[in-house]
């Protein structure tokens, strides 16, 4: 089938690093690439480089379970995630790239009266912030997903909070689309370039030491997700962030069976179906701190038990692949997008297990911060000092499920 497919040009250049740039973004994941794209396209900045220690798409942007949604509750979060969903809705036009944005709906199940109350409250909060929410009863869930275990006496399905604008996006296409667009706007994307240190004088950052030599910078934005603690320690900072591994699983390809994303409310399990047919699912993080990109068997067992409790038919499919990614878990479950105490050094991280859905908004607001030195109106709460002042945004995401 590939006969005749020759002479393809790379989607972005492979430039040598320049001695210096106005803006250096450390980390070529979704957030770093989106930041570069918006800095160049929206804020009309130039002399921008993205430094990536590995290859584009090799980090969590290409390892996640692809779920996007705007179903947060707290005022510090929901406007930001709603901005993100709106940017997803126009992303393919913006990038001129097919990222397979699919608003197939996200259904958060609940299994008790107390959970129904919480879901109703969250749904009202979402609607107040301009998002969409619908409360389904048991029959409403049954009509969407008749294969769920409705007879399980231990976790009866009492209904669900349905968020129809949520869904999935082909994750690595997001990295490639942002990379191609940033490149076309003149951004240098430099792969195999690990930042190993910061040059700081009189409390101002001057540039970065890298595996490909010193690169000067007017401003530096760090967006390295699971490596946040390690990279920022090179600037002498200790972050309120711990790194843990999160695993993902894909089954063999099946005919279409799942209507959209489904999350279990009585255990750590969530599932969707890729366009190729594989069931894509996951659960809880591995409980210990690590920078390793692979997890351990107890979590595999835990995830599979959750799957069996929710939809026993999953036991008939074969697992095809599984992998892990390193999560930057903040202390309150919400991100940090802020200046640091070092002039010219900015930080974006603490995405926990939910940063994929945030990619467009994160890039947009980080670019705003870097370009204007003021926080974007949807990200004013994502400050470092919220931990010091007790202004935590204590929201792990919608319910207990990572995604
Ligand atoms: P990354 O892609 O990890 O980018 C960071 C980059 O920094 C990496 O490429 C890394 O190589 C680079 N880097 C690190 N150190 C250096 C250095 N010293 N110098 C240069 N470069 C460096 N979120 C959702 O919203 N929905 C989901 O369904 C979802 N599911 C997930 C499932 C799994 C299994 C995992 C692992 C994550 C999931 N997430 C999900 C979370 C989401 O993937 C992350 O929060 C998000 O991708 C992090 O931002 P990023 O894309 O910029 O990270």
Image (cartoon, grey):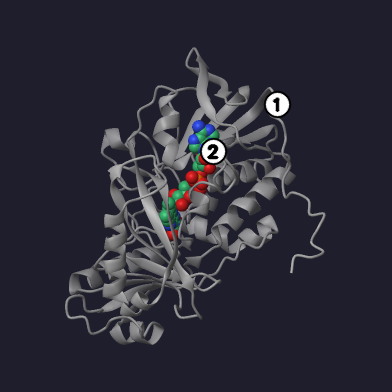
Residue 216 versus residue 126 in the image, above or below = above
Name the one closer to the observer, 70 or 59: 59
Q: Residue furthest top?
A: 202
Left or right? Give the position of 70 relative to 40. left
Q: Which of marks 2 and 1 is nearer the N terminus?
A: 1
Q: Distance between the residues labelled 2 and 1?
A: 17 Å
Q: Please tell me the numbered disc located at residue 245.
A: none
Q: Mark 2 points at which residue?
A: 27
Q: Which residue lies furthest to the left in this view?
A: 154
Q: Residue at x 66, y 27 (%)?
A: 21
Q: Quadrant of residue 79?
A: bottom left
Q: Can residue 79 be seen in this view?
A: no
Residue 98 versus residue 288 in the image, above or below = below
Residue 286 versus residue 220 in the image, above or below = below
Q: Where is residue 227 in the image (x, y as percent from the top left)?
A: 44, 37
Name the one closer to the observer, 290 or 220: 290
Image quarter where the N terminus lies is bottom right
Q: Residues within 10 Å of mark 1 (few under 14, many from 20)?
A: few
Q: Quadrant of residue 153?
A: bottom left
Left or right? Give the position of 391 relative to 82. left
Q: Mark 1 points at which residue?
A: 18
Q: Where is residue 401 in the image (x, y as percent from the top left)?
A: 32, 61
Helix, strand or loop status at disc 2: loop
Q: Residue at x 31, y 66 (%)?
A: 304
Q: Where is residue 171 in the image (x, y as percent from the top left)?
A: 54, 57
Mark 2 near ligand 1 (CB under 8 Å)? yes
Helix, strand or loop status at disc 1: loop
Q: Residue at x 41, y 72 (%)?
A: 318
């Amino acid at each position: 089938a590939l006969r005749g497919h020759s002479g393809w040009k790379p989607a972005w250049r492979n430039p040598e690093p320049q001695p210096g740039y106005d803006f250096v973004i450390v980390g070529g994941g979704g957030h770093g690439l989106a930041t570069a794209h918006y800095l160049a396209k929206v804020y009309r900045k130039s002399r921008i480089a993205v430094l990536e220690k590995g290859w584009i798409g090799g980090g969590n942007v290409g390892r996640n379970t692809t779920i996007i949604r705007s179903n947060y509750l707290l005022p510090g979060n929901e406007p930001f995630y709603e901005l993100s969903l709106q940017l997803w809705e126009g992303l393919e036009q913006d990038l001129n790239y097919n990222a397979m944005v699919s608003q197939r709906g996200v259904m958060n199940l609940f299994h008790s009266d107390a959970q129904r109350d919480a879901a109703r409250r969250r749904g009202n909060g979402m609607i107040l912030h301009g998002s969409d929410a619908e409360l389904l009863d048991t029959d409403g869930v049954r009509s969407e997903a008749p294969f769920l275990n409705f007879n399980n006496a231990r976790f009866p399905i009492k209904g669900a909070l349905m968020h129809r604008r949520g869904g999935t996006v082909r994750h690595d296409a997001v990295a490639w689309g942002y990379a191609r667009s940033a490149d076309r706007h003149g951004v240098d994307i430099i792969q195999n370039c690990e930042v190993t240190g910061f040059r700081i004088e009189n409390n101002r950052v001057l540039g970065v030491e890298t595996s490909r030599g010193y690169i000067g910078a007017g401003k530096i934005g760090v967006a390295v997700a699971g490596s946040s603690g390690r990279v920022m320690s090179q600037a002498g900072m200790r972050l309120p962030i711990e790194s843990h591994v999160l695993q993902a699983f894909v089954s063999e390809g099946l005919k279409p069976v799942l209507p959209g994303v489904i999350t279990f409310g009585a255990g750590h399990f969530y599932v969707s179906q890729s366009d190729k047919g594989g069931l894509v699912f996951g659960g809880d993080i591995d409980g210990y701190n690590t920078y390793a990109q692979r997890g351990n068997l107890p979590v595999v067992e835990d995830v599979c038990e959750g799957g069996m409790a929710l939809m026993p038919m999953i036991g008939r499919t074969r697992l095809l692949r599984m992998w892990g990614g390193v999560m930057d878990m903040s202390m309150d479950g919400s991100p940090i997008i802020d200046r640091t105490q070092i002039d010219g050094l900015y930080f974006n991280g603490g995405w926990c297990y939910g940063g994929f859905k945030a990619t467009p908004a994160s890039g947009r607001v980080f670019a705003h911060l870097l370009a204007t030195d003021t926080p974007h109106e949807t990200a004013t709460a994502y400050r470092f000092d919220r931990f010091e002042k007790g202004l935590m945004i204590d929201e792990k995401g919608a319910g207990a499920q990572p995604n």
